[in-house]
Image: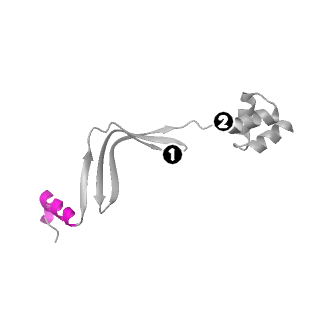
Amino acid sequence: MMPGGRGGFNPKQLQKMMQQFGISVEEIDDVERVVIETPSEDIVIEPADVSIMDAKGQRTYQVTGEASEVKKETGPNEEDVELVVEQAGVDRETAISALEDADGEPAQAIMDLQG
């Protein structure tokens, strides 16, 4: 049977057990927001409550709060745009459009513009 009986853990007993296992938990105060960035979107958690659990050197972060997703505008890489402009002899807007039509592949965009 676990400490605390049926009603759940007694907080003092839980703290003692965690210490015995080398686990500590601390809160990070005054966190305004947490942003998780991916190539296609950002996940913004605001306001955010963050706690860190340290178990024998392994740190785990727990974030709670209201999450929203922000889609990122994805476009061609600037180096690719410059390459297409230079190699195909077109203006920037035409190069961007060609890269979008070629799924971001500069070689294909150049061939499409020259062909």
Disc 2 designates what residue? Answer: 78
Residue at 14% x, 57% y is 11
Q: Position of residue 33 (x, y in %)?
A: 36, 38
Type of amino acid at the residue the image marks with label 1: Thr
Magenta span main SS: helix
Locate the C terminus and report the quarter of the image it occupies: top right
Identify which residue, 2 or 59, lies in the foreground: 59
In the rendered image, which quarter is residue 56 located in?
bottom left
The local crowd at label 1, few if under 14, some if 14 to 19, many if 20 or more residues have their Cα within 10 Å, is few
Count of marks, rendered view: 2
Residue 111 falls within the magenta-colored stretch: no
- For image coordinates 76% across by 27% down, the residue present is 91
Residue 16 visible, this orientation: yes
Nearer to the camera, 74 or 31:
31
Return the x and y of residue 69 as percentages of the image width and height. Answer: 46, 40
Element marked by disc 2? helix
Left or right: 45, with 13 as reference point: right
Judge by depth and name the residue closer to the eye, 23 or 50. 23
Residue situated furthest front in the rendering: 57
Disc 1 designates what residue? 38
Q: In this orientation, does residue 8 appear?
A: no
**Disc 1, SS:** loop
Name which residue type carries label 2: Glu
Residue occupying image coordinates x 13% and y 64%:
4
**For this view, does 64 lie left or right of residue 105?**
left
State the extent of the magenta-drawn residues as a range. 4-20
Q: Is residue 96 left or right of residue 49?
A: right
Which numbered disc, 2 or 1, marks the residue closer to the eye? 2
- The image quadrant where one finds the N terminus is bottom left
